[in-house]
Amino acid sequence: MSEQNSPNIAEDLLCIHAIITRGLNVSIESGRLFAQDGYPDASAREGFIAYVGSLVSVLDAHHLTESDLFFPYFRDKLPDAPIDLLMAQHRELEPVLQQAKAATDEVSAEPRAGAALGRLNDLLGKIADFWHPHIRIEEDHFSVDRIGTLIDAKEHERLAVAAIQHSQQHSGPDYLVVPFLLHNLPPDRRAAFARSMPPVVTQHLLPVVWKEKWEPMRPYLLP
Ligand SMILES: [Fe+2]
Ligand SMILES: [Fe+2]
């Protein structure tokens, strides 16, 4: 790990990848279980729909942030990074994400686990097949050591804030997406990732104002 710069935008990239990876694993495991046994109660169903909806929204916004902001910024600085390939992969996944959004809406209109949940589970499997090889390329080329020495600390900070803002403009609702982001990370990584968020979000909105709204997602999140 690089000692040169902290914070390091490549650490944030690893965090968001870890969030989405856990989100996919939990959604796939829960979706399969519910398709087999049905929802145990209304709250589990509501939380599952909120969790999967947040996952799809966060993943879509992450791709936009990389394609609009991150990749253009590093294109000249890292000429060997396969940016065109990564952006083409984002475009390939886009229709699958739109289908997953539509399937999540259909699941929320389906009172019991049924055909729409089956479709959603298939789409989540497709997304996971795409996801792992895709982030391997990103993490190899935009590694913590490499990015850490490439730009100075102020640039890391500026990029981190810009990435959070861009991502929040393209995802939502905040009262589900923010807890989804922070509570799919273990506590030791959560604080570092939250540093670029306004304090009012982490200290007041999340624990007080939004508390009841994201409560049903808790069984799927980390404490
Ligand atoms: Fe990507
Ligand atoms: Fe990524």
Image (spheres, rainbow, N blue to C red):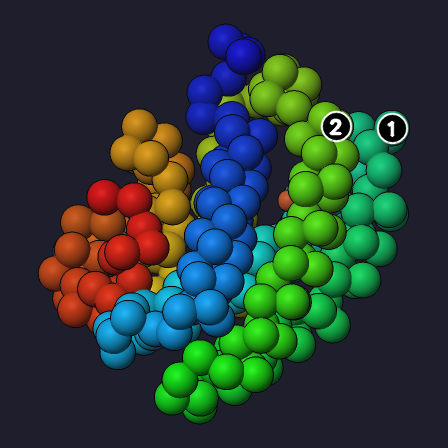
Which residue is at 80% across, 38% downward?
Answer: 75
The residues bearing labels 2 and 1 have C-alpha atoms spaced at a distance of 8 Å
Residue 188 horizontal side relative to residue 126, left or right? left
Which residue is at 54% across, 12% downward?
Answer: 1
Going from the N terminus, do you reach mark 2 or mark 1 first? 1
Q: Pointer 2: what residue? A: 141
Secondary structure beneath label 1: loop
Find the residue positioned furthest to the front. Answer: 37
Whole-percent x, y for residue 4 in the image: 53, 11
- Residue 216 vs 87, above or below: the answer is below
Whole-percent x, y for residue 59 in the image: 57, 57
> Along the line of sight, which residue is nearer the eye, 114 or 183?
114
Residue 67 horizontal side relative to residue 223, left or right? right
Quadrant of the image occupied by residue 94: bottom right
Q: Pointer 1: what residue? A: 80
Q: CB under 8 Å between callouts 2 and 1?
A: yes
Which residue is at 51% across, 29% downward?
Answer: 11
Residue 4 horizontal side relative to residue 71, left or right? left
Whole-percent x, y for residue 139 in the image: 67, 31
Which residue is at 74% across, 28% downward?
Answer: 141
Whole-percent x, y for residue 84 in the image: 87, 47
Secondary structure beneath label 2: helix
What amino acid type is highlighted by mark number 1?
Answer: Asp
Q: Is residue 55 visible?
A: no
